[in-house]
Image (cartoon, rainbow, N blue to C red):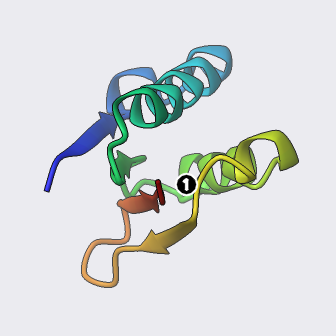
Amino acid sequence: MAKLKLDLHDIYNKGIKIDQALEDIIQEAIDRKIKLVEIIPGKGSGQLKKKVIRFLQQKHIKNKYHRIDKDSKNFGRLFVHFKF
């Protein structure tokens, strides 16, 4: 199964770039009909993960994907599922 991966380690402290990277990967998944996007905010303090989840819960974003899973084995990882 094809999936996209977004690692936010390099831009963890650049809010606008994070939002743009998230928008871009969600749009790419839709354009390419890829059913799974893995987002890696990393472990850290958990602030970046919270920011990513807040971003994904915005109404205009939320209606683009099916559901979010948190990785039970790796706190620093999220999966966004799409249905086409």
Q: What residue is shown at x 59% (from left), y 18% (from top)?
A: 20
**Could you tell me which secondary element the residue under label 1 belongs to?**
helix
Tell me where residue 33 sits by quadrant: top left
Q: In the rendered picture of this protein, how many numbered marks are placed on residues?
A: 1
Q: Horizontal placement of 15 versus 35: left or right?
A: right
Residue tagged by mark 1? 49
- Residue 25: percent from left, percent from top: 44, 29
- Pick whichever, 73 or 81, lies toward us: 81
Q: In this rendering, is residue 1 above or below 51?
A: below
- Pick whichever, 71 or 60, lies toward us: 60
- Residue 26: percent from left, percent from top: 51, 35
- Pick whichever, 56 or 66, lies toward us: 66
- Residue 56: percent from left, percent from top: 67, 50
Classify mark 1: residues with Cα within 10 Å, few (<14), some (14-19) or many (20+): many
- Pick whichever, 78 or 60, lies toward us: 60
Query: Given the image, on which type of amino acid does mark 1 rest?
Result: Lys
Tell me where residue 50 sits by quadrant: bottom right
Q: Horizontal placement of 70 versus 49: left or right?
A: left
Q: What residue is shown at x 41% (from left), y 36% (from top)?
A: 29
Q: What residue occupies the far bottom of the structure in this picture?
A: 72
Q: What residue occupies the far front of the structure in this picture?
A: 84
